[in-house]
Amino acid sequence: MNSFKEENYLKAIYQLGVIDKENVVSATHLANWLFLKPPTVLEKLNSLVNKGLIKYDKTGGAKLTKKGYEIAINIVRRHRIWETYLYKQLNFSWSEVHEIAEQLEHVNSDKLIDKIYSILGNPEFDPHGDPIPNKQGIVPKSDRRPLSKSIKGCVCVVLGVSHDNEVFLNYLSDLNIALNDKLIVEQIISYDESIRLTNQKNEFILISAKAAEQLLVACLKPSCKCKIEI
Amino acid sequence: MNSFKEENYLKAIYQLGVIDKENVVSATHLANWLFLKPPTVLEKLNSLVNKGLIKYDKTGGAKLTKKGYEIAINIVRRHRIWETYLYKQLNFSWSEVHEIAEQLEHVNSDKLIDKIYSILGNPEFDPHGDPIPNKQGIVPKSDRRPLSKSIKGCVCVVLGVSHDNEVFLNYLSDLNIALNDKLIVEQIISYDESIRLTNQKNEFILISAKAAEQLLVACLKPSCKCKIEI
DNA sequence: ATAAGTTATTAGGGTATCCTAATAATAAAA
DNA sequence: TTTTATTATTAGGATACCCTAATAACTTAT
C-alpha cells in the first residue's frame, strides 16, 4: 500500500504497452493517461530505471523489465480478481466495479487474493472480459476482438470493452447489451459503418461504428468467415 | 486512499483517547504508537488543527473535533467490519485479520462497506469482541472487561482481547482459548493472581495474571457478585 | 532546407512526510 | 530551590511527488 504510486506507474506502462502496440510508451503518453505532467512522469521513470523496474530511452519509450513486469502483472491480476469478486459475489454492477478495484488492487495480501480467487472458482476472465493473469504472470488467451471486425451473420458473445469507462458501460446498459449476451450481426450499414444486431429476445439493436470498436466479442460460429485474416 | 496517513492519525487519536482515558494524547504518545518521531507528529497535528479535525494544546493533548471524530470512527467502523468479514466469510484466523483490515479500512466505498456489513447480518461486535460503530458513529456498549476482574465461580464468555497483538492471539490458541468460548473461573491463585479455568470440555486451563488482564470476557451469570463495583 | 510545430528534458519551486540535533518548557528529585 | 530528567517545540535537512517555465531535440509542412 506504500508502493501505491509505483504500482500504478508500472500498471500503466503495462496497459499502454498492451493497448498501443504500435505506439511507444512515452513519458507524455503516460502523463496523459495518469493525468500528470510530463516532467513529473519523467522524474518517476528515472527512479524506476534506477530500481531496475523498467528500461527507458526516448526512442523506444518505457519498457518493463522482468522484475517490473512481475509487479505490474500482479496488480492487473489483483484488479481483475477483485472486479470479478465485486461483480459475482457482492452483486455490484458491471460499471461500478472498476473504481473500487482500483483501490483494492493495492491491498497487499496474497492470501486474501488466493482466497477470493478460489471462491470464484479460479476464473480465467473478469466481468469485463479481460483475462486474469495466473500467479506466474501468464495471461490466458482468447479470440476476443472488437465487434467492428465482425461480418454479417456473425454470432457474437459479448466479452468486454476495450476501454474501461463508466460512460460507455452505461451506454451499453441503455442499449440493453450486457456481458455474455449473444448478438447476431444482421447488417452492416455501409453509409456510416453502424451495425444492426438482434439479441436473444429477437430485439433489434443499432450500434454505432464508434461503439462497435470498443465492444469486445468473440464469434461463436466455429468456421465463420470473420475469422479469416486478409 | 489518499488520506491514508490522515485517517491513521485520526484513528490513533481516537484509539489512544479510548484506551488511556487518564492519559492525554500527547505528540510523544502518538509518536510511539505510530512508530514516528515527535516532531513529525507535531507537524501533522498542526495541520490537523488547521483543518479543524482536532484541537491541540500541550496540557490537554490532542482531541478530536466533531468532524475529526466522524472520520476516525468511520475508519474504526470499516476496520471492524472488514475484520468480521475476513473472519466469518473468508475463514481467516482470528490472528490474521487485523493486518489485512489495516489496509482494507482505507478503501473508500460506502457501498462496499454497506454490502459486506449487510452480508454479515449487521453485527454489533467484531471477532475481537470490539464494538462496531454504526453509521451515525454510535458505539454499541457491552459489559466486556478483563478476565482479571472475575471472581471464583464466574461463568465467562470470551469476547476479545484488549490489545491487538498476534503473539498474544497465538498464545491463546496454544492455551486452547477461542472467541466465544465459555470459561468457568475455578480458582484464583493468590500467590501470583493466576487463574484456573475449566472450558466447555471440562478441561483445566491455567492462565497467568498478565494474560488475564488482556483477555476480555463478559460474565454470563445474571447477578454474579463480580458485577458489584466497590 | 528551413520555419513551425511537437515532444523531451532540464531547471527550479511547492507541499507533504519523515528525520536528527538543538533549544525551550516543564516535572521530578535531591 | 536548584539540579536533573523528561517532554515539547523549533530549526534545518532529505526524499517523494507534483507543478510551471524554459530550453533542447526532434518532425513535418512548406
Image: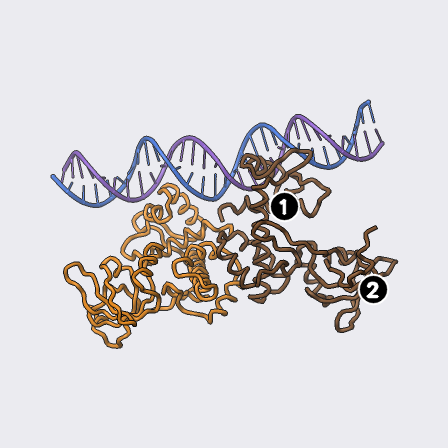
Chain colours: A orange, B brown, C purple, D blue
Q: Amino acid at mark 1?
A: Tyr
Residue B144 left/right relative to A57: right
Say whether mark 2 and mark 1 are on the same chain.
yes
Q: For the point 14% across and 59% down, which residue is it? A: A191
Residue A40 left/right relative to C18: left
Q: Amino acid at mark 2?
A: Gly
- A221 or B184: which is nearer to us? B184
Callout 2 secondary element: loop
Residue A47 left/right relative to B41: left
Residue B110 left/right relative to B133: left
Q: Where does the image place residue A180, in percent across and percent down from the top left?
A: 34, 69
In this view, the mark in front (1 or 2): 2
Upstream in the sequence, badge 1 or badge 2?
Answer: 1
Q: Where does the image place residue B19, in percent across and percent down from the top left?
A: 69, 48
Q: Where does the image place residue B166, in percent across and percent down from the top left?
A: 66, 58
Callout 1 secondary element: helix
Q: Is residue B68 above or below residue A228?
A: above
Q: Which residue is mark 2?
A: B153
Q: Residue furthest bottom?
A: A222
Binning the other alpha carbons within 10 Å of mark 2 as few (below 14), some (14 to 19) or many (20 upward) gives some
Q: Residue furthest right?
A: B191
Rendered-image quadrant of the C terminus of chain A: bottom left
Q: Where does the image place residue B114, in percent across and percent down from the top left?
A: 52, 57
Q: Subunit of mark 2?
A: B
- B191 or A45: which is nearer to us? B191
Q: Subunit of mark 1?
A: B
Q: Which residue is mark 1?
A: B14
